[in-house]
Image (cartoon, rainbow, N blue to C red):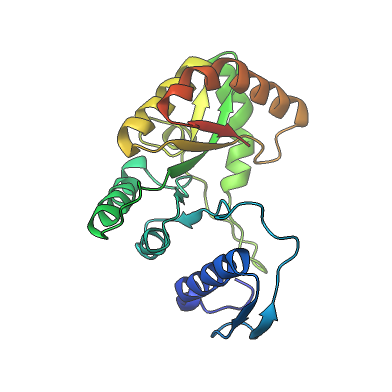
Amino acid sequence: MLGQPPESKAARKRENTELLIRLWTEERVTWQGEFRPPLTEVTVQPRPSQSAPPLWISGGVGSESVHLAVEHGLPLVVGTTAREPRTFVPVFDAYRTLWQESGRTDPPGRLGAASHVFVAESSQRARSVWASYMNNYLTVKKPGSTHSTTPPDFGTYIGDNGPAICGSPAEVVDKLGRLHELWGHDLHLLAIDVGGIPYAEVQAATELTAAEVLPQVAVLGSQAVTGA
């Protein structure tokens, strides 16, 4: 990533997060770290209106982001777009467990997830429209190479044990409900505009999601699902 050694990712994320928190919560920051130039008496303008700005920590299957989120009392959103849903159960469980064991007296932060989603009037239409675009999106070509990786089987990718959600409103509601039972999260980001889908299809899917999916899953959490 921009020439940065992968092994420094966790340390960079911690340093940047902790610096951001200080810049948002302190009026004058003098700071020195490992990965960026030092700061002397820096004030961020305009000042945030909240005493605790709404910062979320992103996470994957590793534990570093879970620890970072709990240490700072922050919510965690897990990137659940590319693996079997059960892969992420330990991540959600670790956050709740670590929060309890940390001695914090405040309520646990919110937990979020994310999915690639496409909804149409019928299951058949949703699959026929989405398949080619998602296959293109999931075909990875390394820079400078003519070789592309083979995308996963589309039926498996959107199936019961797959990470993506595709189908009629009823099918999408059902899978979101099952994921909530599995993870116990209360925020779910829905990425609809992926893979170069034509705008008219994105608009139709978004409107159908808003009209027939969101009202049925809103009770799953305080802000159960957000479309994107």
25 relative to 85, above or below: below
Q: Is residue 68 left or right of residue 44?
A: left
In which quadrant is the C terminus drawn?
top right
Q: In this view, does 129 lie to the left or right of 224?
A: right
Percent across and percent down for residue 226 are 57, 33
Residue 20 found in image quarter: bottom right
Percent across and percent down for residue 15 are 51, 74
- Residue at figure coordinates x 48%, y 71% from the top left: 14
189 relative to 109, above or below: above
Q: In terms of depth relative to the viewer, which is nearer, 27 or 198?
A: 27
In which quadrant is the N terminus drawn?
bottom right
Percent across and percent down for residue 152 are 47, 44
Q: In this view, does 158 lie to the left or right of 88?
A: right
Residue 104 found in image quarter: bottom left
- Residue at figure coordinates x 76%, y 31% from the top left: 199
Q: In terms of depth relative to the viewer, which is nearer, 80 or 224?
A: 224
Percent across and percent down for residue 16 are 56, 71
